[in-house]
Image (cartoon, rainbow, N blue to C red):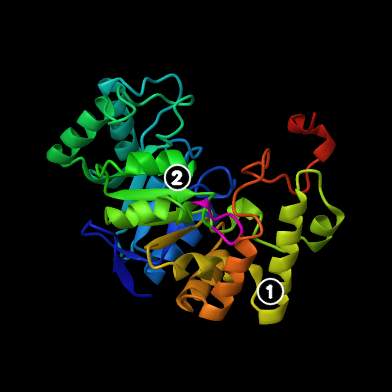
Amino acid sequence: MKTVKLGKTDLEVTKLSLGGLFISDLTGDFEKSKIAAHCALDTGVRLIDTAPSYFNSETVLGNILKSYEGKNKPLISTKLGMSEPWNPKSKADIYASVKSSMGKLGVDCIDILFIHEPERRLQMDWWDDETAYDGPVMECLSEMKQKGMIRYTGVAGTCTHELAKIMDTGKFDCVLTAFNFSLLWREAEYEILPVAKKHNMGVICGSPLQQGALAVRRDEIIESGAPWISKPRKEQFKALYRLLDDTGINIVEMSMRFVISNPIVHCVLTGSRSKEEFIDNWNVVEKGPLPEDILKRLDEIRDMVPFRPTNELFLLPWGEDFAGLGWLH
């Protein structure tokens, strides 16, 4: 797989990169995660993304990298944040977070350090000035670059309008956007991707399978109409399934190839839980962008639900006891 330059950085990444959420005790199988990660590195993957909030992903990934004997030394991106309590306006806490990540990962420099969800002020209040987006964190990032602790900075989030405003300051090298650029959820097209292009930012897309919503077909659930499915979303899923039938392309391939079809996107993350899953994703991405006629039909399907319906969850409750979900009452 060819590499591409990640925006205005000097980092070269493969179109398929490895997401670290499932390289953790979340899967409960260290050996399986190690085999998958070693396979990804042997195949040529250049970037692995993780975060302190991804369970114990940093520790597990650090142990996997120590055991790797191949020649491919990956680029590592991680994010700011620590176990509660910590103060996002405390320079001491920010430095402690980065030093903790470096220790767990076994690295002396982080290639990309993201501020994690900087657009969600009620979860973590990073900013002294929410128009200029200034605060201690920006001082720390500048100092860490000068000290050689980090190479590049970025923002990683999910709220497209709010995240785009932070990106538009021009202060960051990369963006990792998740939950908002996939076959049926495409809000990033309105502001995230145009702003990234304007500032020549590196663009990494997470959750191309929408955390399972696009991992397998669920014709029966869609047809029966689970309580969280609005009528427009239900009809949109059915239109997508018809396109899959017409083209003979399975839903995972359609999803992965759709994301890399956008020239603004530099790489897409796979949360592969096994060697077999990784190889399947790699082979799909190797096929390259989708044909223009399929992209046109996907645009028509997008237009059926251009924005996320009210009360639709980020993590869709497939197979859950719908009646027990509090948001229904």
Say left or right for 289 vs 111.
right
Looking at the image, residue 312 sits to the left or right of residue 283; the answer is: right
**Main secondary structure of the magenta stretch:** loop
Residue 207, above or below 247? above
Residue 218: x and y in percent read 76, 60
The amino acid on which the numbered mark 2 sits, given as a three-letter code, is Val
Q: Is residue 145 above or below residue 250?
A: above
Query: Does the stretch in magenta take in 152?
Result: no
Residue furthest to the right: 224
Of marks 2 and 1, which one's residue comes earlier in the chain? Answer: 2
Q: Position of residue 141 (x, y in %)?
A: 23, 35
The residue sitting at 31% across, 37% down in the picture is 103
Q: Which residue is mark 1?
A: 243
- Which quadrant is the N terminus positioned in? bottom left
In this picture, residue 315 sits left or right of residue 117: right
Question: Considering only vertical position in the picture, is 130 above or below 173?
Answer: above
Q: Report helix, strand or loop for mark 1.
A: helix
Numbered label tally: 2
Q: Please, what is the three-letter code of the amino acid marked with disc 1?
A: Leu
Q: Residues within 10 Å of mark 1 (few under 14, many from 20)?
A: some
What are the residue bounds of the magenta stretch? Answer: 182-187
Residue 114 in view? no
Tell me if residue 87 can be seen.
yes
Residue sitting at 81 percent across and 48 percent down? Answer: 226
- Image quadrant assignment for residue 133: top left
